[in-house]
């Protein structure tokens, strides 16, 4: 977390050697994470850029807590590293090093952070649903 302080990934992306179209998409999404305190600031940027392992019990607990909130409860939920994805709803939750769940949505096929990180995964899921309803 300390390495991100003062070095927002938005400012370093152009020097990353990525192709311009990739850098542009990456920068615009990361900029939203860094410039707004709502999606999580530096910790939100870390969650956006990195994945790490989370124990299976935590992921099972998240699945159980969001299950009643899902619009398609029989659709599968994908769990990978620190990410829980409900593809049917277009929602992804990412667990951060600060113990909060960060909501994401993919209205155009690219996961983007939305406001509403919470220690309660159900609250983060609700925030993502609210965000999806505004887009639709």
Image (cartoon, rainbow, N blue to C red):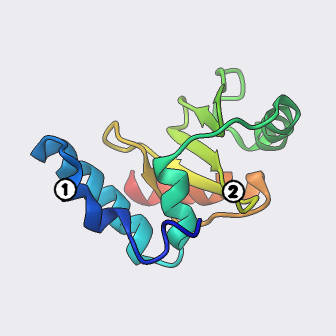
Could you give the CA–CA distance between mark 2 and mark 1, rounded to whole angstroms? 26 Å
Q: Is residue 78 above or below residue 34?
A: above
Q: Nearer the viewer, residue 56 or 110?
A: 56
Query: Mark 1: few, some, or many residues within 10 Å (few <14, many ≥20)?
Result: few
Residue 49 seen anywhere in this rendered image of the structure: yes
Q: Secondary structure at mark 2?
A: loop
Query: Mark 2: few, some, or many residues within 10 Å (few <14, many ≥20)?
Result: some
Name the disc covering residue 135, or none.
Answer: none
Q: Residue at x 53, y 75 (%)?
A: 38
In the displayed structure image, the side of residue 14 where residue 11 appears, left or right: right
Q: Residue at x 55, y 53 (%)?
A: 47
| Res 1 quadrant in image | bottom right
Q: Is residue 67 above or below residue 15?
A: above
Q: Farthest residue in the left direction?
A: 20
Give the x, y percent position of residue 78: 63, 25
Give the x, y percent position of residue 6: 42, 78
Disc 1 designates what residue?
15
| Res 123 quadrant in image | bottom right
- Looking at the image, how many numbered discs can be counted on the residues? 2
Mark sitting earlier along the chain (2/1): 1
Q: Nearer the viewer, residue 125 or 48?
A: 48
Residue 129 seen anywhere in this rendered image of the structure: no
Q: Secondary structure at mark 1?
A: helix
Disc 2 designates what residue?
97
Q: Nearer the viewer, residue 130 or 120?
A: 120
Q: Residue at x 70, y 35 (%)?
A: 53
Give the x, y percent position of residue 66: 76, 42
In the displayed structure image, the side of residue 116 where residue 15 appears, left or right: left
Q: Is residue 126 above or below residue 63?
A: below
In the displayed structure image, the side of residue 112 where residue 18 appears, left or right: left
């Amino acid at each position: 977390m300390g390495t991100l302080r003062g070095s927002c990934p938005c400012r370093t992306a152009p020097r990353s050697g990525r192709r311009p179209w990739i850098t542009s998409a990456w920068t615009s999404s990361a900029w939203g994470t860094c410039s707004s305190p709502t999606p999580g600031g530096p910790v939100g940027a870390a969650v956006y850029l990195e994945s790490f392992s989370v124990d299976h019990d935590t992921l099972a607990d998240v699945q159980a807590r969001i299950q009643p909130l899902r619009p398609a409860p029989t659709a599968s939920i994908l769990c990978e590293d620190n990410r829980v994805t409900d593809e049917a709803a277009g929602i992804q939750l990412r667990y951060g090093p600060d113990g909060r769940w960060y909501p994401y949505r993919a209205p155009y096929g690219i996961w983007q952070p939305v406001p509403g990180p919470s220690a309660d995964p159900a609250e983060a899921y609700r925030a993502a649903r609210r965000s999806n309803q505004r887009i639709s």
